[in-house]
Image: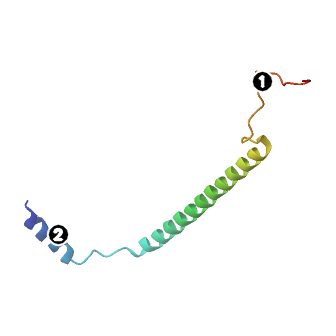
Amino acid sequence: MNVSEREATVRRMLERTPPPVPPELYADVVRRGSRMLRRRTVALRLLWLALVAAALAFTVWAWVAHPWVEPPSTTTPPISDW
């Protein structure tokens, strides 16, 4: 099947009238769509909550541990009484 035959076949398929959609299908689609939106909303809220919790945990850890301060040296004793 060459390109022109494929194009002609596709044109014939597109020119036909689409088959009728069952009326109960609309209610199913709306129900599934609203369920998907609720799940997506819950997932996004949980992700934001996890992000805020991680930022808060990091802030508390940094406030308590002071990771930017260099630890005291343990190899040389302090010099005193000169």
Task: Say which residue appears at 53% left-offset and 69% top-offset.
Answer: 34
User: Tag 1, which secondary structure?
Assistant: loop
Task: Say which residue appears at 70% left-offset and 47% top-offset.
Answer: 58
Task: Say which residue appears at 82% left-offset and 22% top-offset.
Answer: 77
Q: Could you tell me the amino acid type at mark 2?
A: Val
User: Tag 2, which secondary structure?
Assistant: helix
Q: Could you tell me the amino acid type at mark 1?
A: Thr
Q: Could you say which quadrant of the image residue 12 lies in? A: bottom left
Q: How many marks?
A: 2
Measured in 3D between alpha carbons, the distance from the residue under mark 2 to the one under mark 1, in whole angstroms, is: 79 Å
Badge 1: residue crowd in 10 Å (few <14, some 14–19, many ≥20):
few
57 shown above or below 32: above
Badge 2: residue crowd in 10 Å (few <14, some 14–19, many ≥20):
few
Compared across the picture, whether 3 is left or right of 43 comes to left
| Foreground of the two, 57 or 10 | 57
| Foreground of the two, 79 or 29 | 79
Q: Quadrant of the N terminus?
A: bottom left
Compared across the picture, whether 77 is left or right of 27 comes to right
Compared across the picture, whether 9 is left or right of 36 comes to left
Q: Quadrant of the C terminus?
A: top right
Task: Say which residue appears at 63% left-offset and 58% top-offset.
Answer: 48
**Tag 1 residue:** 74
Q: Could you say which quadrant of the image residue 18 lies in? A: bottom left
Spot occupied by residue 45 in the image (x, y as percentages of width and height): 63, 60
**Tag 2 residue:** 10
Which badge, 2 or 1, comes first in the chain's sequence? 2
Between disc 2 and disc 1, the foreground one is: 1
43 shown above or below 26: above
Spot occupied by residue 2 in the image (x, y as percentages of width and height): 7, 61
